[in-house]
Image: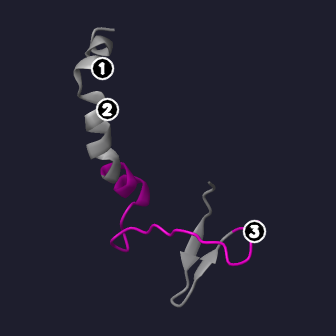
Amino acid sequence: MRTFNAHYDGRFIVLDEPARIKTNAKVKVIAPDTEDGDLADGCARLSETTFQKIWDNPLDADYDQL
């Protein structure tokens, strides 16, 4: 799995850097909800529920004492 910087030119999504990707390869594009949205912040918020399940459990409580 790789991450590439890109931008939307009003018609197409354009990679900002050369990339070796097979022709017709499937890709997934993730974009912020708003123009001024922070993609990193949005991805972090999407992960909060999963991290809560991992961190807030009895087996993890031992690490609270470190």
Q: Does dot 3 land on a helix, a strand or a loop?
A: loop
Q: Amino acid at mark 1?
A: Asp
Percent of width and height locating residue 3:
60, 58
Q: Residue at x 22, y 19 (%)?
A: 58
Q: CA distance from mark 1 to mark 3?
A: 43 Å
Badge 1 crowding class, 10 Å Cα cut-off, few under 14, some 14 to 19, many 20 or more, is few
Q: Residue at x 39, y 54 (%)?
A: 43
What is the span of residues highlighted in magenta in the rendered image? 17-45
In the figure, is residue 6 to the left or right of 22? left
Tell me the quadrant of the picture where the N terminus can be found: bottom right
Q: Name the dominant secondary structure of the magenta segment.
A: loop
Q: Amino acid at mark 3?
A: Pro
Q: Does dot 1 land on a helix, a strand or a loop?
A: helix
Tell me the quadrant of the picture where the C terminus can be found: top left
Percent of width and height locating residue 51:
32, 38
Q: Amino acid at mark 2?
A: Ile
Mark linked to residue 54: 2
**Residue underneath mark 3:** 18
**Residue underneath mark 1:** 60
